[in-house]
Image: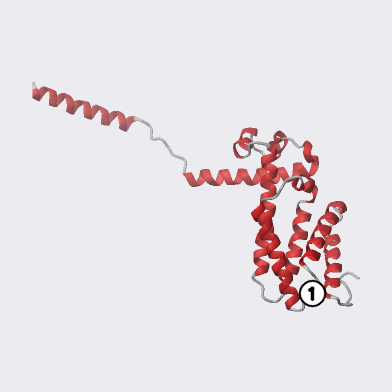
Amino acid sequence: MSGTASRARATSRQDGTQARRQQPAVIQQPARAMRRDAVRNYERILQSAREVLGESGADASIEEIAARAGVGVGTVYRRFASKDALIDELLKLALEEVIMAAEHALARTDGHGLEELLRAFGQSFADHARYADLLLQRRPDAAAARRIRDATAELTARAIASGVVGSGITSADVTALIAAMRGMVQTSGDSGPEVWHRFLDIHLAGMRGTTSALPGS
């Protein structure tokens, strides 16, 4: 009786092994490939959002953004719960760009880090000018804003100490210049980068207190 049971169990194991061998192999998509695809879609969505928001402003729709990005609406919503969440992400990325520029400027020891940061501000304003009003309606991350303020104050102090700008210049003056440059970029529209570059050059010359000819004069 036990021998019969043993043979039955052996036969069952052989049949199970054969069945497993006959089943088609399941091909698993590599996780790395899936991550690359997700990153690519994320970048497409952001670029599309920048374009569509620049064209349509607050009237831009998720459907239009998805179509421009070449992805389904569901793909956008899986990454961003709403259009507001997408705009928040654009603001976060814009702040991160400025923070990176500030850290790079802080690594300088020649006193010209302030000018480098101011030019980074100008470029950021120009890059996001067409939908800047949507970004300005949101409150930026407090920690990020503080890091930028602290870097601006530190770079101003260094510029004064090294004689790059006049001793009468304050961090409040620099903050006012940044705000003025932002407003100028927004109102000038698509006039070209030379507009904000010259605007900044003029103010930098005034901060240095020199009478040398300005670029483009």
Q: Secondary structure at mark 1?
A: loop
Left or right: residue 107 versus residue 36 is right
User: Foreground: 165 or 118?
Assistant: 165
The spot of residue 80 in percent (x, y) is 63, 39
Residue drawn at the location 11% of the way across and 22% of the way down: 4
Q: How many marks?
A: 1
User: Foreground: 63 or 179?
Assistant: 179
Residue located beneath label 1 in the image: 165
Residue drawn at the location 72% of the way across and 66% of the way down: 153
User: Foreground: 55 or 90?
Assistant: 90
Q: Residue furthest right?
A: 217
The spot of residue 199 in percent (x, y) is 86, 63
The spot of residue 164 in percent (x, y) is 77, 76
Which image quarter is the N terminus in? top left
Query: From the viewer's perspective, is residue 68 above or below residue 142?
Result: above
User: Foreground: 144 or 18?
Assistant: 144
Residue type, numbered disc 1:
Val
Query: From the viewer's perspective, is residue 165 above or below residue 5?
Result: below
Label 1 environment density (alpha carbons within 10 Å; few <14, some 14–19, many ≥20): many
